[in-house]
Amino acid sequence: MENQYLHEVAITAIIIKDGKYLITRRSMQKKRSPGKWTVPGGKLETHDYMDMPKDSESCWYNIIEKVLRREVKEEAGLEVKNIDYITSMAIVHPDGAPSLIISCSADYASGEVKLKEDECDQFAWVDVEEAKKYDLLDGIWDELMMLEYRKQGKRLEWQRFK
């Protein structure tokens, strides 16, 4: 890797509505993990802030939230609120590209699911037990479990749950 500091940055959202979580199936045309179930999200792009006025003398704030709202709207047609950090992960994809993924939760605010079909082709609202029946990307079910524990007032770092 030429530049050890250069990563794609992606932000994902586990959207919560009526106690269920939105999962989507990645389009079969996707280069990475086609047909796997995951949660909406996407990459940070420079236009997410460069084309906007700065919030302070030198910085843009709430970029993760802006990216997440844009990606959820584009991919699933939904508006979200109450965005909260869950965990982060790093991955080196089979094509050699490193990614930093910031995983968040968000409450459903409005809209009907309307999928961007080149991104994802199916969706389901599931509880944590129903989610086990889907071919989820590795680690997503454990993130759902983290949210289940939060309902009990426990904030845990990512780990494997049984």
Image (spheres, rainbow, N blue to C red):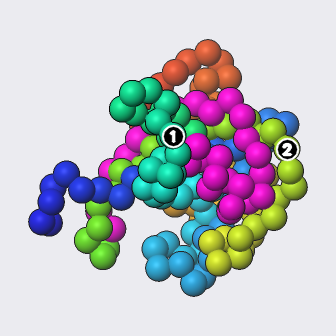
Is 24 placed above or below 64 here?
Answer: below
69 inside magenta stretch: yes
Rendered residue at 72%/51% (across/down): 22
Asked whether residue 86 appears in the rendered view, the answer is no
Residue 44 is situated, as x and y percent measured from the top left of the image, at 46, 54
Q: Is residue 92 left or right of residue 24?
A: left
Identify the residue under disc 2: 110
Residue 130 is situated, as x and y percent measured from the top left of the image, at 73, 51
Camera-side mark, 2 or 1: 1
Is 146 placed above or below 29 here?
Answer: above
Which of these two is toward me, 69 or 135?
A: 69
**Do tag 2 and tag 1 residues touch (Cβ < 8 Å)?**
no
| Residue at the limit of the structure toward the bottom, as seen here | 29
Identify the residue under disc 1: 53
Name the amino acid, label 2.
Ser
Q: Is residue 139 left or right of residue 149?
A: left
Rendered residue at 44%/26% (across/down): 56
Residue 100 is situated, as x and y percent measured from the top left of the image, at 36, 51
Region in magenta: 66-93
Is 130 placed above or below 118 here?
Answer: above
67 inside magenta stretch: yes
Provide the secondary structure element on which disc 1 rests.
loop
Name the amino acid, label 1.
Pro
Which of the 4 image quarters holds residue 102?
top left
Mark 2 surroundings within 10 Å by alpha-carbon count, few (fewer than 14), some (14 through 19), many (20 or more): few
